[in-house]
Amino acid sequence: MRASLLSTGPRLWIPRRSVHDVVTRDLPRLVKSTKGPGGRSSDSGYTATVFGATGFLGRYVVNNLGRQGTQVVIPYRGNQEETRHLKVMGDLGQIVQLRFHLENEAQIAECIRHSDVVYNLIGSDYPTKNFSFEKVHIDGARRIAKIAADVGVSKLIHVSALGADPNSKSKFLKTKALGEEAVRSEFPDVTIVRPGWMYGSEDYFWNRIGYFGMYLGVLPIINGGKTRMRPVLSHDVALAISKLMTADGFEGKTVELYGPREYFLLSLYELFADASKRRPYAVPLPKFAAKLLAGGVNAIQAYPLISPDEVERYYIDDKITPGTLTFADLGIKPKTAEETISPFTRIYRPVRYMRQPYEELNKKYHTESL
């Protein structure tokens, strides 16, 4: 025997649970080994990093990926209270949480170095004292794309916005367009996704209308309610984004995800009022007054209810770019606002209607019916 085994002194026990050897697959990383019966309690063979997983859209993307048995890396900042609801979206060890900062390249590289697919869902509707639109939508997006290319990630899926335009009057839409250019310069095969105005359980779309109507009793009408919009259900957008992980032929392409019907903004207000059984007073606001009010209210609130830049976006019609891919190319049929609005309005209904069954909305609200 070796002398080390005959030693009678105290021995140091080293836990081996966290010690592992990860083998990185070479490009194009197309060989996958699936384990398990399918679903959450399985392993699809894919590893995906989702930046922005704690946001409104990100939680639904993580849920769809976890349902397929994908191991999901969730970069986050702040504390774990913001990510704990994501842990149950995959089996044990399938949801990996890593702390990161958008300006720390080493941390970003650590988050994506074992991933086959990287999603960038990071975005902001309003600037903060630490992050401007440019830092989030341009600099941060470029940094993630560059590191993904250097590490050798197979796919990068970058979420922008419908109506992104470098000449837009909205800084949100302008920086989103410049961010697309920055990402393409670093990762030419990136798939750009442009969702329209999204709504869901935690949105700032229906909930904003409900808040004004229920608590203030008034509903500000911006641009006279004439803006043309194509709102889309967040669940449909998340399903499409998750399908892009395994879909072929989308590299270097742009996918626009918008609702199947077009509405005037005023018609959407009427749809919400009919579904919620509540009729607030409509108060038309000129642009300068709406921006001034938004800036004043946001100065005393922790989280802006609506930002001045969002007011500007309410003056911009949703426009579809010819030649881009859509839900149909992914085999998805998106739902209309009439089909899905009722559950989102229940908490804003008067008490006498709270427990009543939802009624069918027979009125035509979309622009084709006007």
Image: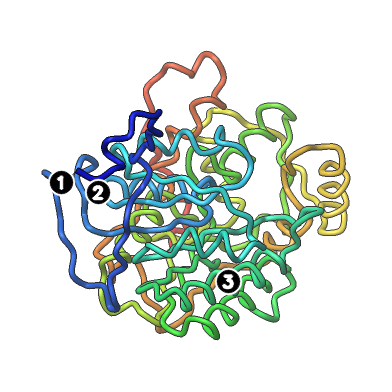
Q: CA distance from mark 2 to mark 1?
A: 7 Å
Label 2 residue SS: loop
Percent position (x, y) of residue 9? 39, 29
Say which quarter of the image contains residue 239. Answer: bottom left
Circle 2 sits on which residue? 69
Q: Which residue corresponds to the image point at 48% horizontal and 61% vertical from the top-left?
A: 262
Percent position (x, y) of residue 359? 38, 30
Amino acid beneath label 2 = Gly
Amino acid beneath label 1 = Gly
Percent position (x, y) of residue 264? 57, 58
Q: CA distance from mark 3 to mark 1?
A: 38 Å
Farthest residue toward the top?
A: 352
Closer to the chain start, of discs 2 and 1, is 1
Depth check: 312 or 13 in front?
A: 13
Closer to the chain start, of discs 3 and 2, is 2
Closer to the chain start, of discs 3 and 1, is 1
Circle 3 sits on which residue? 163
Amino acid beneath label 3 = Gly
Say which quarter of the image contains residue 323. Answer: bottom left
Contact (CB < 8 A) between labels 2 and 1? yes
- Quadrant occupied by the N terminus: top left
Circle 1 sits on which residue? 38
Which of discs 3 and 2 lies nearer the camera? The answer is 2
Depth check: 282 or 337 in front?
A: 337
Depth check: 363 or 157 in front?
A: 157
